Amino acid sequence: MAGAGIFLCILLLQCFISTALCNPGFAFTEEPSERAGKSDGYCSRILRAQGTRNEGYNEFRLRVEGDPENYHPGSTYRVTLYASSPAYFRGFTLIALREGREGDKEEDYAGNFQIIDEEDTQFMINCPPAVTESTPRRRTRIQVFWTAPPSSSGCVTLKASIVQKRIIYFQDEGSLTKRMCEKESLYWETTEKPLLDCCACGTAKYRVTFYGNWSEKVHPKDYPRRANHWSAIIGASHSKNYVLWEYGGYASEGIQKVAELGSPVSMEEEIRQKGDDVLTVIKMKAQWPAWQPLNVRAAPSAEFSVDRTRHLMSFLTMLGPSPDWNVGLSAEDLCTKECGWAQRVVQDMIPWDAGTDNGVTYESPNKPTVPQEKIRPLTSLDHPQSPFYDPEGGAIIPVARVVVERIARKGEQCNVMPDNVDDIVADIAQEEKEEDDTPETCIYSNWSPWSACSSATCDKGKRMRQRMLKAQLDLSVPCPHTQDFEPCMGPGCSDEEGSTCTMSEWITWSPCSMSCGMGLRSRERYVKQFPDDGSVCTLPTEENEKCIVNEECTPNSCLVTEWGEWDSCSATCGLGMKRRERMVKMPPPDGSICGAEVLEVEKCMMPECHTIPCMLSPWSDWSDCSVTCGKGMRTRQRVLKSPVELGECTEDLEQVEKCMLPECPTDCMVSEWTEWSECNKSCGKGHMIRTRMVKLEPQFGGDSCPETVQRKKCKIRKCNRGGGQGQVNSDEKKRRKEAREKRRSKQGGRQGEETTSPAEHPGCKMRPWSSWTDCTKLCGGGIQERLMTAKKRLKSAQLPSCKDRKEIRACNVHPC
């Protein structure tokens, strides 16, 4: 029992450290000595503390950001412990255990906690894997980061206990326990995944398609309506020796240019400098605006190849406008463990931060991150002003989806698993093609539709398409072929009929066209692959159906006018929109909103748009700054090289940016002089003063400040010395001398103290000097004054000798 007693003391000490309020209702279970010995030296004892269960424990909740059912190995999550109002807690303990473990050993604990606010949370002194409060006080919420354990760690249980007036149990189930099991790694995994050597043979060709889902409908908060876009996509297929970008790494200059400016030029230069580590450079055009229906604008795509040494694929594109937010894939391995080539990869994507700008909203002003931070995924709890903010810490809705599909294989294959029907059909459908190396100086028309297949049977044949050369801007650069061929088979030779289209899934239904009563809603899909025989796809890409909203309402109870004329098309070329309106003549008699539609919008098609690419010279060097010190501007230019006859070029030919040189010297600035003060003597010689203030101290080597106080002499009139007789003057002088000596003898005992004795005047008695008045200014030079008044006038006194006196002096002359 001695061991159990020691164990009880340790638990009481732990209660004190973790700031638990140990009341008489709190008790501990004495464990057998074997159990106590097992836990010595570690923190499993905190799991066996018992107290009275609080019936309202559901007021407290443990929440893990994102998907609460699974964790991704090595990923970091925000863990929140909070109380519902009006509940609160004073202390807490938080641990993460491997499933089925009791916490007796260090290896029983899973992952690692990270402190966010040291004033609020800390690691427990006697149990380092656990997190507890820093100070005992009322609180309603705490947050920490938790990094999930590595792969193959199994399920993990996060447990919390609450200290209020008594300890609430560690919950085996309920709101204070969160069980999470390992999930297969996704593209945004933050740990370094081991890149195995590829054992596949031959080469494979893939098509990557980017489907943007960033729209005002899906992400309405602060959505930038005018400038929303995806920048040009840049990437590569590469070896494991080259890292384009990765979570936990730092953005290169090329990544920074894409992330902040949407420019892929520097990134492409970095990729091409990697030589044999790169097989294909992946490029796709920018998308303005960011989202349009797929039947209006096809999703951008590009083709690339992989081989045994360069079997990884990475890319990125900027979410614009934004501080430095992007989406993309990092080192996606297309080589399978069975020594084959992956057939299809689909990933939903959330934005990530490049760590180069501190902005928190789409259109935050530029604010460079110094020093540069690591690349990390955005979360819904980053900042309350973030467009992705969610106070509950939910997962961010994906802003895009990328689909990587294998379209062909070349060379002898050595995959362990035998090919299925899809593999065989994919290899027959397309052969390896050379990359499109069309020079920018060659301008072509669009390709014509494919011709019918040359084979009417299931033997392999060919079909053809053509295009026209419209302009050759540089005669020294030859333009490639105007015909294109690809293999095909006769109708009905594939698994499906040759005239069958491959369609995408239907997009979700649109809102009902009526807010009251019966209306229409629609949904869309697009053609993923046209028929092998080159025929037209006849399957519908749009569906409409009736919908009813609020059957009890009476939309026809209001009267409306006839429809007006259609407006002109919003586009001058290509696809646009037009609208028409009507008015409500009489609202419903019950005062409700009229349910009839008053606005109709439909698509309109104008002649096809023709754009001519601009041929531009490289940018010139930046000019000198427009100033010699302080803030200024600098410019750079480029020249239009393509002929004017081809059309107007809308690209900028000049760029302007701010520049900063050393600060300019600033001289001291002072105010104007004040008026001269009154003379400080009522007779005889005195002085007057005037002052001025320092408005701006000198900076960066500027001229120093001049004087701020000036004095000058003044003389009002001669002082009257008495009745004019020499004897009287002599007696007067004698009395004054005696008075001065008397004052000096008094001042000897209190040096520096001003005399308050009244001054003697012939024929009158004076009061002592008054105290000095408050200074008229706090700084920059002010004035004080004091008075002496006559207390008693004798009959023999002459009028001038009994006149009130005033003295003036300067004060607070230090600069402001």
Image: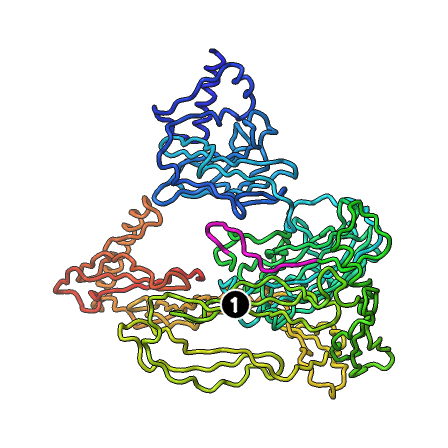
Q: Nearer the viewer, residue 417 or 144?
A: 417
Please give left or right for residue 724 compared with residue 474 in the image.
left
Residue 479 found in image quarter: bottom right
**Can residue 144 be seen?**
yes
User: Circle 1 sits on which residue?
Assistant: 668
Q: Is residue 707 above or below residue 415?
A: below
Give the image location of residue 430, x and y in percent.
Answer: 79, 63
Where residue 326 appears, as percent x and y from the top left, is: 63, 59
Instruction: Please count the marks in the image.
Output: 1
Q: Is residue 697 left or right of residue 332?
A: left
Task: Give left or right: position of 523 versus 691.
Answer: right
Residue name at image x 69 percent, y 45 percent: 192
Characterize the magenta stretch by its predominant secondary structure: loop
Magenta extent: 389-404
Residue at coordinates 52% horizontally, 81% vertically from top-left? 578
Q: Residue at x 52, y 18 (%)?
A: 36
Q: Nearer the viewer, residue 584 or 787?
A: 584
